[in-house]
Amino acid sequence: MRQFICSALLIAFMLGIAHADSIHLKNGTIISADKTTEKADQVEYSIGATHYSIPKSSVSSIEHGTTFGFSVGTSKSGLIAPPVVSGPSVSPAGSRPLVTHSQLATALPPAPQLRGVDTEALHAQIISFGKVSDRALYDIQSEGNTSRTSAAYFIAAEYSYQHGDGEAARRYMRSCVESMPEQPALLEWYSVLLLDGGQYQEAVVQAERALEKAPHSADAFQTVGLAYYDSGRLTDAIENWKRAQEIKPSPAIANYLAKAEREAAVEQRFNERDSKHFVLRYEGREAAFRFPSELLSTLDRQYGELQRELGFSPDSTVTVILYTQQQFFDVTQAPSWAGALNDGKLRIPVRDLAGVTPELESVLKHELTHSFIYALTHGRCPTWLNEGLAQMEEPRTSSMYAASLAQLFSNNQQAPLRVLEGSFIRFTPAQAQLAYAESLAATEYLRSTYGTNALRKMLELLSDGEAPEAALTKVTNNNYARFETGLGAYLAKQ
């Protein structure tokens, strides 16, 4: 998210307490919810007036805690830029309501039930010292029992996915499907894992195979709808999600469907251009025929810059969609303070198409950074670090906010980094100001004190499945509390 923060920020933060829950998914995503209820096989939660549900099997833990609330007084200079809603998060307007790759856990179909297979014994045989044993998989396959072989590869794929190794998960899942190609649930899993790796066309093929074998399955219609959606086939996605709802109504599918229908209503007459790394969609205007080329050129340059800095690039092309201000809010239902959104696609409101302004260039760089960070960490990056890195890439500095932030830290009134791990979408505009300013300051402090290599190492640890605070501790030898103490001192010196 690209934040809106006052220049010479003069903040009078008076903190109160508001209850909130953090739902930790097995794939590393953290959902910040106002209220959470556990049912037999579902976890139901609400954000504002909107209600959602996800399979309990995708949840690793739920923390019932608190977040911050405050009032803000600002300087006369006002707001310098609206924020951009992005990164892995979940909310009615936020990053993936509910279809982007950071939320794929909600799309995973139930684990297949393979009769006559002792899955617990297989798991103990396959997973050794926290790693998948390829030797054990080979030995099991050599037995010639297709059910055991398929189950073994499924366990390996699921374990790899949950621990952040999407490439290995897809490789194991391919072997799983090859062992039992007639199982629709396995094909559905394979399709979703392919989507996670940006392999959209192959994901469609596998999802369509699953639907052929289970033509009355809501899970199959849901999966093929997701594959069509990520492939840009909105009409087909809508049709299949409607069929899924007819068979087995689901709040998650209802959200998928509503979002796709909003997009289709706005984007049905959009034009499309592409480059090596991007697909650009926009409403055609004769007077602006040079603008798409200029924007794609800017994006390609920024892509190269991030590729060099991070030593990494996403596997899939990045879709960028340009809207008018009204179209943007109609489609995304983003909070009024949002200036753009990244839900797996970069959704950018543009006031005019005369050219790529410096402000638009900053927004694009910020949002593209989120796409890189998501792909690099498999959606496991905490929002404070994700937003801090994106702001630094604009580029932006927290020096103008240092005095005000230092005062907050000295009074122990800062927003705890643990709270800033999850989505910022639920925050009020005032709370968002603090969240973005503090995220930028924390990331700058991490880089200036521990070096650029510390940032890269933390991203690697997150990619490997390390929890955010644990990754920070390994890199800095400080937990959140000690790191925040150091950050306060750093800000005071600024």
Image (cartoon, rainbow, N blue to C red):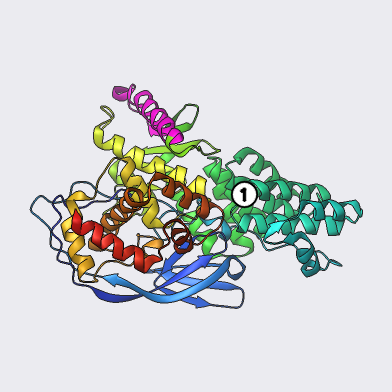
Residue 80 pos. (x, y %): 18, 46
**Residue 301 x, y percent position in the rendering:** 39, 28
Q: Quadrant of residue 164?
A: bottom right
Q: Nearer the viewer, residue 71 or 480?
A: 480
Q: Which residues are magenta?
A: 281-308
At 45% from the left edge and 56% from the top edge, which residue is drawn?
475
- Work out whether residue 61 can be spotted: yes
Vertical arrangement, residue 15 with respect to residue 385, above or below = below
Q: Is residue 477 magenta?
A: no
Query: Picture coordinates of residue 94 (x, y %)?
Result: 40, 56
Residue at the far left in the pictured view: 76
Q: Is residue 387 left or right of residue 254?
A: left
In the image, 41 versus 61, the foreground residue is 61
Residue 214 visible in the shown view: no
- Residue 486: give x, y in percent of width and height: 30, 62
Which amino acid is tagged 1?
Answer: Gly
Q: Is residue 302 magenta?
A: yes
Q: Is residue 360 above or below residue 68?
A: above
Dominant SS type (magenta): helix
Would you identify the image quadrant in which residue 308 lies? top left
Q: Is residue 132 above or below residue 301?
A: below
Secondary structure, mark 1, is: helix
- Along the viewing direction, whichever of 4 and 107 lies nearer the viewer: 4
* Residue, disc 1: 166
